[in-house]
Amino acid sequence: MTDDEQLRRLDPGALKALAHPLRVRIFDLLSTHGPQTASSLAALLGETSGSTSYHLRMLAAHDLILEVEGRGTARERWWELPQGRIDIPGPSQTMTPANRAAAQIVSSEFFRLRHETLMSWANRPESEAPEGWKDAGLIATTLLEMTPTQMEDLKAELMAVVDSAVTRYRGQTGPDVRRVSMRTDLFDIPGSGPVLSDATDENTEES
């Protein structure tokens, strides 16, 4: 993250405001497609503009989205995401039941949309790929044996790469520029136990 970029951690009120599948989809569309109006979002989502307008107001009430300055009219307002990053907490045992439920809704819908977008790209016929983009992407899964400290160090290295790319490419325009999704996943596999060497893992029972 650059020095001038802010990280906002959602408070319970903002988290609850976002905890609606349609609002998460609106938030995601503003992220991937850029500024939109209630009408353009309605067309993308198959909803009425009255519905999208209502949900936009709920998001704006908690500063999750902002009106685009100098664009639009009193009848047709444009909305965008604030600059910087938002930390959306996952469900936690320390949360109240209501906040935990809200976090579950938000995280589940974001991951569903994320997977949907990935599969849409992975299953796109080669003939539909724009010129020069067919082999530009990457899907890679690597399994490692690490300690928690090593994973923290690797996380910092990966985030440094992400932050460097953000600094170089954010706001780029041009005929060959498309919006790109960069995904970084690093996690211990649930249910996996300690990785032991052969010497310490074998049975040593004596008769």
Image: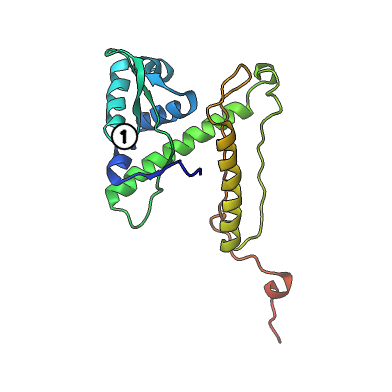
| Residue 158 image position (x, y, % from top left) | 60, 48
On the picture, is 2 further left or further right than 14?
right
Residue displayed at 54% across by 58% down: 191
Q: Using the rendered image of the protein, determine whether residue 87 is visible from the camera's viewpoint.
A: no
| Residue 127 image position (x, y, % from top left) | 69, 16
| Residue 18 image position (x, y, % from top left) | 33, 36
Residue displayed at 41% across by 48% down: 90
| Extreme residue toward the front, this view | 4
**Observer-nearest of 140 and 175:** 175
Residue displayed at 58% across by 29% down: 180
Rendered image quadrant of residue 125 = top right
Q: Is residue 2 above or below residue 202?
A: above
Q: Is residue 191 above or below residue 180?
A: below
Q: Using the rendered image of the protein, determine whether residue 70 is visible from the camera's viewpoint.
A: yes
The three-letter code of the residue at mark 1 reads: Asp
On the picture, is 206 further left or further right than 96?
right
Q: Is residue 99 above or below residue 146?
A: above
Rendered image quadrant of residue 117 = top right
On the picture, is 79 further left or further right than 200?
left
Residue highlighted by disc 1: 63
